[in-house]
Amino acid sequence: MSTAAVLKTVRTLIAPDKFKGSLTAGEVADALAAGLRSASGTGTVHCELLPLADGGDGSVDAAVASGFARRTYTVAGPTGQPVQASIAFDGVTAVVEVANTCGLGLLPDGRLEALDASSRGFGEAILFALSLNPARIVLALGGSASTDGGMGMLTALGYSFRDAEGRQLHGNGRALARIHTVHRSTLPELSDTEFVIASDVHNPLLGAQGAATVFGPQKGAGPGDIAALEAGLAHLVAKMDEAGFTASGSLAEHAGAGSAGGIGYACLLLGATQVSGADYFLDLLDFNTRKDNCDIVITGEGSIDEQTLAGKLPAAVARRSGTLPIIAVAGRSLLAKERWSEMSLTRVYTLADYTDQDSSKDSELSRALLRRIGRDIGASLL
């Protein structure tokens, strides 16, 4: 910090994740930058903004903020209603996310539909991305409303699921147990395109750590629903094996198969490879080159806690920043000051230190507090 204080211009890289429920990563970066630029002192603060994502909701926005083009397309929302979804595309790589196609935030009136929500809209967005002839599609799986094992997604991509009477089934959690036959798609684009799952979720599809048991409750599933979804997902695995996916059982046990209500499993069936979401997006958005041109890195997320230390985006940013000073900004921090060194953090600023109000659902208050924090950071640098 002392070396930064004597510089006429301090070059900062502002690289936060979203503050979930309050601000997007881009809005966090904008507010911090506004505060930093308004700071008074003996020099000026130059801000480079790099809103980030880790493969969850906000992944498309982060890619667009870094230079990808936004493309919009109407898809079926989690309960079938049409929604305007966005993908990001740079001519080579497309980024498609669950959250803005069939995510929890798209449920009408916020009413949870544990058994009836579908991943079909995500498959429709993938189909739209394929029409652009990308070399690669990045699949961002966070925030799903469904637990259908990706049945809805696969239906949109040409797979046919039928019941014992030969009737076409809609892809949702309730329909899983009724699958009698599966007909595989021959869509050529599926084999000509590289699919990458960018996710840091490591749960398998089935069992005590699986999609239904761990994530079902946050989607409205009670004990009976969880048991039905678990049985339905196991039935899906068996039927996919009968349909010729001989690796179906082993893929269900794969780390990450349980992400996004089992959409991870369906993506693995399509041949997708799984990578760390945080690290993949740092590479995709060229973090290493950008941080090399800066004197200090400012990162953050809604809550800094034990999960952050376990490898969430701010920890990946800190690890990649090398010897650069790192400041974290968060809505709140549950991490004792003595543990900042575990992420090489110089300082942690929290919105909770600036107000007694709950800013987690108040975007305007969050913006105002981030501008104040940015101004204080700037004053400490100049």
Image: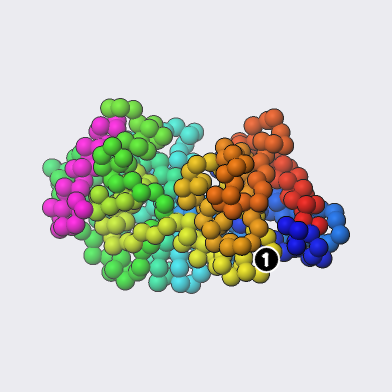
Residue 248 drawn in magenta: yes
Position of 187 with respect to 145 (left or right) is left
> In the image, is residue 114 part of the stretch drawn in magenta?
no
What is the span of residues highlighted in magenta in the rendered image? 225-250
Helix, strand or loop: magenta stretch: helix
Q: How many numbered markers are drawn? A: 1
On-image quarter of the N terminus: bottom right
Q: Position of residue 21 (x, y in %)?
A: 56, 40
**Residue 303 pos. (x, y %):** 56, 41
Point out residue 132 in the picture as x, y percentages from the top left corner.
43, 69
Instruction: Label 1, secondary structure: give it.
Output: loop
Horizontally, residue 116 falls left or right of residue 45, namely: left
Given residues 198 and 221, the one toward you in this image is 198
Q: Position of residue 156 (x, y in %)?
A: 32, 54
Whether residue 171 is visible here, answered yes or no, is no
| Residue at 28% in and 45% down | 205
> Which class describes the residues within 10 Å of circle 1: few (<14), some (14-19), or many (20+)?
some
Q: Quadrant of residue 223?
A: top left
- Which scheme is used to colour this image of the protein? rainbow
Q: Please, is residue 212 above or below residue 320 in the view?
A: above
**What residue is shown at x 54% (from left), y 49% (from top)?**
342
Question: Which residue was labeled with disc 1?
Answer: 294
In the displayed structure, would residue 232 be above or below residue 286?
A: above
Q: Residue at x 70, y 51 (%)?
A: 32
